[in-house]
Image: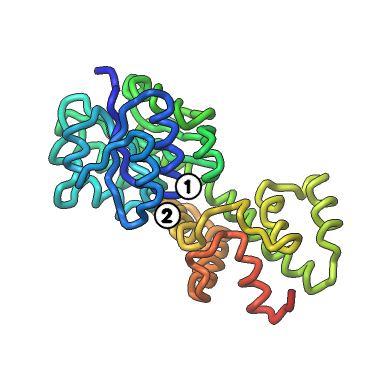
């Protein structure tokens, strides 16, 4: 079955760019709307259709992309009233671009397969900027023949696609990637807070770090906060980061593998959310650390 009509659930910071690029490459697109109307209305203006439920989406499309917050939202889209599962038919593909718990991914794949369909994990890396540009990175898990069928759709919004293994492997790789990324953000935030207290020149700090072995993408993004009060280089909410870190520590616990650093990083994000920063972007970890240490900017 050739995929011509794609469904999209989750038209937010990342989903808007995904949908825009699917349309741009000539596929039909239908979306399930939500309270944030601006990105939905923009896709409709570009030619997308809006339907009222995941069930209706599956009835009208050849494949569906999920781009929602996490496992509860994925499970609601699959199993909820008017969910996708009730409309899955032979050969139907659901690709989950969300960051989700691998055990849930594997269970959903079994239930979707029982209806003749396929559930694959295709979580993303990079930012809304790359989503809009169509240059996301994807980690994929599932049967290679199924991934080959949906590959033309994935190519619309990703320029790096890595095969991780069977269903669930993509989400395991994603959790590892996010732990490294958010762990680097935590280190950078603490170093920047200490540098502020020490009176270090922030441009000099940036120049020396980014020229040597201490450099990281996250430091390069976070240092823009003290330099220009700009947190737009890592548009990822602290609440979502906290959720991803908990998924990672859940995974390590079930192995079981000790993960001391991950637990510490997770608790930093928990504290930041409890301090009222849950909807702020990750670079605002710096503000949290300045606040609890009584450091003036």
Q: Residue 82: horizontal and vertical position, in percent?
A: 15, 47
The circle drawn on residue 114 is none
Q: Is residue 286 above or below residue 235?
A: below
The residue positioned 83% from the left and 57% from the top of the image is: 203
Q: Nearer the viewer, residue 175 or 98?
A: 98
| Secondary element at tag 1 | helix
For the residue pair 22 and 85, the one nearer the viewer reads as: 22
Q: CA distance from mark 2 to mark 1?
A: 7 Å
Extreme-front residue of the structure = 45
Residue 230: x and y, percent?
66, 59
From the image, tell me which residue sits under label 2.
247
Q: In which quadrant will I find the C terminus?
A: bottom right
In the picture, residue 287 is in which quadrant?
A: bottom right
Q: Earlier in the sequence, mark 2 or mark 1?
A: 1
Quick check: 201 above or below 163? below
Q: Position of residue 271 (x, y in %)?
A: 53, 72
Quadrant that contains the N terminus: top left
The residue sitting at 34% across, 25% down in the picture is 27
Which residue is painted at 71% across and 57% down in the image?
Answer: 224
Number of marks? 2
Residue 101 in view: no
Residue beneath the point at 52% across and 54% down: 236
Judge whether 95 appears above or below 203 on screen: above
Which residue is under mark 1? 175
């Amino acid at each position: 079955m050739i995929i011509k009509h794609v469904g999209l659930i989750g038209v937010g910071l990342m989903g808007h760019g995904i949908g825009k690029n699917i349309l741009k490459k000539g596929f039909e697109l239908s979306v399930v709307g939500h309270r944030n109307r601006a990105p939905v209305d923009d896709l409709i203006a570009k030619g997308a259709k809006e339907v009222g439920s995941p069930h209706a989406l599956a009835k009208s499309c050849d494949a569906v992309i999920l781009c929602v917050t996490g496992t509860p939202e994925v499970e609601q889209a699959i199993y909820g009233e008017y969910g996708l599962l009730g409309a899955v038919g032979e050969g139907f593909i659901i690709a989950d671009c969300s960051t989700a718990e691998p055990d849930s991914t594997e269970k959903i794949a079994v239930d979707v397969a029982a209806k003749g369909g396929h559930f694959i994990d295709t979580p993303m890396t990079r930012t809304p900027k790359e989503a809009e540009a169509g240059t996301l990175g994807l980690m994929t898990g599932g049967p290679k023949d199924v991934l080959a069928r949906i590959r033309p759709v994935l190519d619309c919004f990703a320029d790096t696609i890595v095969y991780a293994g069977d269903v669930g492997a993509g989400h395991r790789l994603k959790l590892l990637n996010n732990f490294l990324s958010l762990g680097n953000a935590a280190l950078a935030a603490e170093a920047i807070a200490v540098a502020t207290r020490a009176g270090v020149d922030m441009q000099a700090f940036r120049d020396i770090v980014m020229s040597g072995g201490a450099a990281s993408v996250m430091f390069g993004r976070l240092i823009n906060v003290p330099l220009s009060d700009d947190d737009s280089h890592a548009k990822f909410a602290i609440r979502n980061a906290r959720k991803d870190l908990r998924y990672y520590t859940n995974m390590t616990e079930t192995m079981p593998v000790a993960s001391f650093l991950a637990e510490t990083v997770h608790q930093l994000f928990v504290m930041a959310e409890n301090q009222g920063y849950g909807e702020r972007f990750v670079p605002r970890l710096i503000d949290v650390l300045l606040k609890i240490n009584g450091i003036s900017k």
